[in-house]
Image: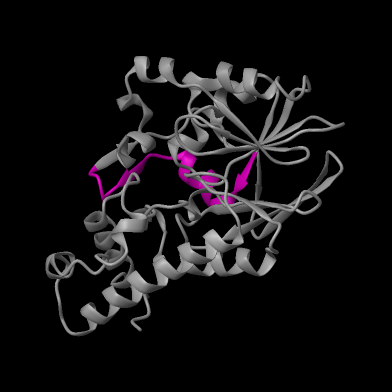
Amino acid sequence: MSVLNFLTPGAIPQEEFDAIEIEVYDAAPGVLMLVGQGGNIGISYGDDSVFMVDTQFGQLTEKILAAIKTRTAKPVQLVLNTHWHGDHVGGNSNFSKRGALIVAHERAHARLSVDQFLGAFGQKVPAAPKEAIPVITFTENISFNWNGDVIEVFHAPEAHTDGDAIVHFHTANVILMGDTYFNGMYPFIDVDTGGSIDGMIAVANAVLARCDEDTKVIPGHGPLSNRSELLAYREMMVAVRDAVTKLVGVGKSREEIIAEKPTAALDAAWDGGVLDPDTYVGHIYDSVTAAGAVLR
């Protein structure tokens, strides 16, 4: 599936949703990772109720609820969106209609509230319906004492977008990174809505500083992960950023830099996800040449 289909679920045929099965992974006692179509979902369950991170697509809500019920009969009471993209917020309306409160960073709220334009794909994304828009927002961080855990949510500025949220389940020793982490693949950086390669690297550094060897890391896309895999991902991003920045510094154009294949030595390990190497390099170029970017 293309990145554009992830962001605009109306382009996905219903039969594709019909074929999806929600996979359930136990990241830690009381914390799940759900994998279906679109961004991975995080679940905290216990004595209180279900704290849910991201909602995938509305067409999958009943399957997601059935997956949750394999572990708990408690209702979903809180939904935290890691950012505004459709494959992470597409089920918001369904959960809010069932009584869940939706939480997000103030920039994600702002983006969901009005039409957006993804210049990388020439695609307009309409504003979300009222019931899908978060009702609780934060600027830097917010914490929830829920299900016997301390769930800390903090902003990752100018990373995948300008409104990314990272979720740290302290007691469970699990960190959910949303689309600031594409495990085992080149990431999509939404430069049009405030994302940057420097921000992606910065949030990887911030999460690595919180991890120990037992920490489980839930990526936005890809399998359940850990500190060593996140470190490799961070090193890949630094290598590509530095290579592209060097070529920009000697006057190479976007097309010339893509033709240079600066990811060639990395493609065997990182190609094969939703973004091909040339597109990734183009996004890195757009990021390092954006107004205010620092050339290294």
**Residue drawn at 42 percent across, 15 percent down:** 18
Residue 109: within the magenta? yes
In the rendered image, the vertical position of residue 25 relative to residue 187, given as above or below: above
**Residue drawn at 41 percent across, 72 percent down:** 238
Quadrant (top left/top right/bottom left/bottom right) for the C terminus: bottom left
Question: Residue pushed farthest front?
Answer: 268
70, 2: nearer the viewer: 70
**Residue drawn at 83 percent across, 46 percent down:** 149
Q: Which residues are magenta?
A: 103-122
Q: From the viewer's perspective, tell me whether residue 106 is left or right of residue 69.
A: left
In the rendered image, the vertical position of residue 181 relative to residue 78, given as above or below: below
Q: From the viewer's perspective, tell me whether residue 272 is left or right of residue 222.
A: left
Q: Residue 105's x, y, as percent?
A: 59, 50
294, 128: nearer the viewer: 294
Q: Residue 213's x, y, as percent?
A: 69, 62
Residue 254: within the magenta? no
Q: Residue 133's x, y, as percent?
A: 56, 35
Q: From the viewer's perspective, tell me whether residue 14 is left or right of residue 91.
A: left
Q: Residue 165's x, y, as percent?
A: 59, 52
